[in-house]
Image (cartoon, grey):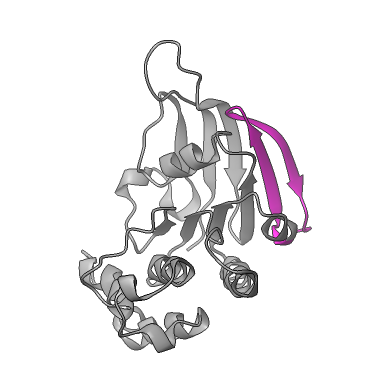
Amino acid sequence: MTVTIEVVDVHKTHGGIGTPPALRGVDIEFLPGELTVLAGPSGSGKTTLLSIMGGHDHVDSGSVSFGDSLSGVTAPELNWRRMGYLPQALVLLDELTIAQNVQLPVQLSREPLPEHLADEKNTRVWLERLELSHLADRFPAQTSGGEQQRTALARALRLEPAVLLADEPTGQLDAGRVGIVLDVLIEYARTGATVVITSHDPTVIAVADTVITMADGEVVSQRRQRRR
């Protein structure tokens, strides 16, 4: 399953009259098989756009559509199987262990899953890939912020979604772990997934296939760094 995300003339304002728009006529196409980075300073609109794409916010005008195999499907209709979402807040459940948090999308799935996805071994695979295996039985409060961030990423990837959206996925990581997460994101995009992340980290921006820079709610530049 491959998915192209089309953002067309999206406008969004938080608050009432006189509040500066968060997004001003944004037009972007996100392609499958690519790691796309939304870059820009705080307040540029990149988190708002990601939240709208993930179905956690709505547009004032314009549209976000998911083409190809998900034609006609809107963001709120997507589930863990089709879209993985990593917010900055992480939203891990304190009463569940690290492994149980990663396994949660399986427990919440409303549709039958392929055998390899339903198998709990798949949880262990993601824990290993993100160097979390030794923390499997700990609770979030017993781990660092960076370990929690990698746990939330593993949860987002657990059902191998066609779309992965991640808000500052390396923001809480030490330098030694950033490379691990970037390797996972790049490899996942190469499977044909549409991977979109926000970041202002030059290390992250440098490895992206496409970099879209935003400022004051608008796209100010779009640069392809890898030839398709």
The one nearer the camera, 186 or 134, is 134
The one nearer the camera, 165 or 2, is 165
State yes or no: residue 213 in magenta.
yes
Q: Where is the C terminus found, in terms of image quarters?
A: bottom right
State yes or no: residue 9 in magenta.
no
Q: Which residues are magenta?
A: 207-228
Residue 171 vs 150, above or below: the answer is above
Residue 62 image position (x, y, % from top left): 47, 26
Residue 214 vs 14, above or below: the answer is below
Q: Is residue 32 left or right of residue 102?
A: right
Give the residue drawn at x 45%, y 11%.
18
Q: Residue furthest top?
A: 17
Q: Is residue 111 left or right of residue 183?
A: left
Q: Quadrant of residue 160?
A: bottom left
Residue 151 image position (x, y, % from top left): 41, 71
The one nearer the camera, 56 or 168, is 168
Q: Is residue 217 left or right of residue 102?
A: right
Residue 42 vs 227, above or below: the answer is above
Residue 89 image position (x, y, % from top left): 39, 53
Residue 185 vs 91, above or below: the answer is below
Residue 113 is at least partly visible in this image:
no
Residue 157 image position (x, y, % from top left): 43, 69
Q: Quadrant of residue 168?
A: bottom right
Give the residue drawn at x 36%, y 81%.
123
Give the residue drawn at x 50%, y 78%.
130
